[in-house]
Amino acid sequence: MPGNIYIDEDCVDQKYRGLGIGTKMIEFALKMCKANGIKQFSVSVDITNTASEKTFIKNGFKPIQKEYVYS
């Protein structure tokens, strides 16, 4: 979709979680979007990853859908 950045996966190594690295990555990505006129930034978060979901919500993201995949 034009004007939209979509990130399918991002990850902080387990031994470095809880140190604010994920938040810094999000802040940097949002700064780059703003600097380049990108109006929408979407991410995919594993439905079971509540810590990641909380980080994105804390940084202004709003959940719009839950997706379920059978494999």
Image (tube, helix red, strand yellow):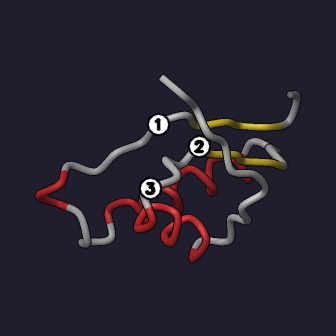
Q: Nearer the viewer, mark 3 or mark 1?
A: 3
User: Between disc 3 and disc 1, whose residue precedes?
Assistant: 1
> What's the residue type where badge 1 is placed?
Glu
Name, please, the residue furthest toward the right.
2
User: Between disc 1 and disc 2, whose residue precedes?
Assistant: 1
> What's the residue type where badge 3 is placed?
Thr
| Residue at image mark 2 | 44
- Identify which residue, 49 or 43, lies in the foreground: 49
Name, please, the residue furthest toward the bottom.
58
Which residue is pictured at 51% across the width and 57% down the height? 26
Which residue is pictured at 79% across the width and 44% down the height? 38
Q: Residues within 10 Å of mark 3 (few under 14, many from 20)?
A: few
**Marks 1 and 2 close (CB-CB < 8 Å):** yes
Name, please, the residue furthest toward the left.
15
Which residue is pictured at 66% across the width and 42% down the height? 67
Q: CA distance from mark 1 to mark 2?
A: 7 Å
Q: Position of residue 28 (x, y in %)?
A: 51, 55
Q: Quadrant of residue 1?
A: top right
Name, please, the residue furthest toward the top.
71
The disc placed on residue 38 is none
- Identify which residue, 34 or 21, lies in the foreground: 21
Q: CA distance from mark 2 to mark 3?
A: 12 Å
The disc placed on residue 48 is 3
The disc placed on residue 9 is 1
> What's the residue type where badge 2 is placed?
Ser
SS under mark 1: loop
Up-down relation of residue 14 to residue 1 (above or below): below
